[in-house]
Amino acid sequence: MPSESSAPPAISVQHLWVTYRVSMERKPTLKSSLMRAGRGERLVREIVAVRDLSFDLPRSRVLGIVGNNGAGKSTLVRAIAGILPPTQGRIEVRGRVSTLLALGIGFNPELTGHENVILGGLAAGYTRAEIEDKFEEIGEWSELGDFLELPVRTYSAGMFGRLAFAVAVHMEPDILLVDEALSAGDAAFKAKATAKMHSLLDQAHTMVLVSHALETVQNMCSDAIWMEKGELKMMGRPADVISAYTNNENVDANAATTREDV
Amino acid sequence: MADAVVSEQSSVDDDEFRGNYHVYEPYRAGLPRLKPYLRELWRRREFLDEMARSRVRAENMDTLFGRAWTVLSPLLTALTYYLLVLILTRGAGVENYLIFLLSGIFLFQILQDAMAHGAKSVVGAGRMITNTAFPRVMLPLAEVRLALSEFWPTMIVLVVFLIGYRIPPHWALISLIPIFALYLIMCAGIAMLLATLQVFFRDTRSFIPFFSRMWLYASPVLWTSNQVPAELKSLEWLNPMYAITASWSNAIVNGTWPAPSAYLIAAIWSFVLFFLGAYVFLSRERDFAVRI
């Protein structure tokens, strides 16, 4: 692959460690921490979520991350997004990043759909002008029509999901990070969202996709990573990685449960 | 096929690319690298603005008086105190007391909002913190911005009262520009400090109403600086709000210029609290995503 040496990778993760210190208390209060200090205890536990993980992802590739719950997939994506700082190692990201980690970030239910598109877009790091440019397209894609001028609290879950998804994917990010976001909504929405994702891929966007839906990874991704207990177990073609993962887990890649668990 | 796209795109977009180059590394000395942090903060100023403004729009939307509450609430507070002081002092008192009280209460409202809402700002942001990358310091700063935008309408009310009481404007009002700027800097520092404390000690918020009221009573808002007994005069500087509130009300009501020491004390307190708040916030900020 000659061009890869000339173009630097879109995402380069080098010996990444992410460690959390998690408080074991339900609600940390001054009293409880004073009392613990008095007893000489510490109720923090260190959790290594990502352990010495390295990979490069060239531009316009789609990386699927598979693994069990708690394998560190979400942590890895959040580290790439710059939300969780590395404990050790280094991440380089080239390009404008947009995240689909949860839907409707920054939305205020009291405000109208229109106002929330602006707010959500600004929260994601775009300028007001860029958002205004895309507004019509977002409105059209989300199929909300007149509802755009009504407060978001009046929306159904599906309408909310469509609007939030539309904001994230219509801003033309260079790199899109997705964490299970396709799971929102009904079958029609899923189909529409998947189609939109495919069209993003055709425009040569780089994407990282965390999913339990092995079928989605198989269909959409050019590369795949299998994570286990924070470590990189395998990286390669999706078909190979998925079959290794499923053999290890003794689950059938085509079993109904994994298919539905998008 | 993918490879061809890679080489073609990279030559076209190289310039735009550089502006969007992020490196994430472990923090060294507790603080993030300040230059990129501040640059990002500046780039995101529209979001800060919109956060504050959308809160104004969303709040009070379904109450009868709507946005009028931003003026009504401090006005009613002032009237309550007015009655209280009238009863306690049996009317003996200060010339233009109501004006004096209003100007002080309206000013103090910014600090009280910055404290109450600043403390909630990070913990209340929840999903936004765990799912979006942005300079977290925008959250408490937006609360100060919001408090400021709710402050301006109360100034209109104050002007109406000033006209009613026939108190003419005086050149000394110019002195309030630096005093007010220092005050806002202090509010920002306190908001950042309390926002961080609230993440680690969830009961911070419960103390704030009491602390904020005690601070009000300890400042020359209900009483004037002339009424301070001589033996306590030397302790005035211990209250960060003393110089600011005294300069403010005296300039508005009496047209007196603040003493040079008032500027100095206000400046020292404001910058100390600002840098303390900023340091505490920025050095703890990376823990927020896993702590809330």
Image: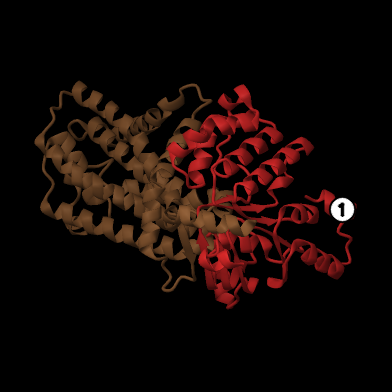
A69 or B264: which is nearer to us?
A: A69
Q: Position of residue B7 (x, y in %)?
A: 54, 59
Residue tagged 1: A257
Q: Is residue B32 above or below residue B125?
A: below
Instruction: Please tell me which residue is depicted at 27% across the width and 48% down the height of the picture.
Output: B183
Q: Is residue A135 above or below residue A227?
A: above
Count every numbered label the image shows and give the total.
1
Instruction: Please tell me which residue is depicted at 33% across the width and 46% down the height of the picture.
Output: B216
A129 or B17: which is nearer to us?
A: B17
Q: Quadrant of residue A19?
A: bottom right
- Residue type at mark 1 is Thr
In the picture, which chain is red?
A
* Chain B as rendered: colour: brown
Instruction: Please tell me which residue is depicted at 71% across the width and 38% down the height of the picture.
Output: A192
Q: Is residue B98 above or below residue B230?
A: above
* SS state under label 1: helix
Which quarter of the rendering shows the N terminus of chain B?
bottom right
B244 or B222: which is nearer to us?
A: B244
Q: Position of residue A257 (x, y in %)?
A: 87, 53
Disc 1: host chain: A
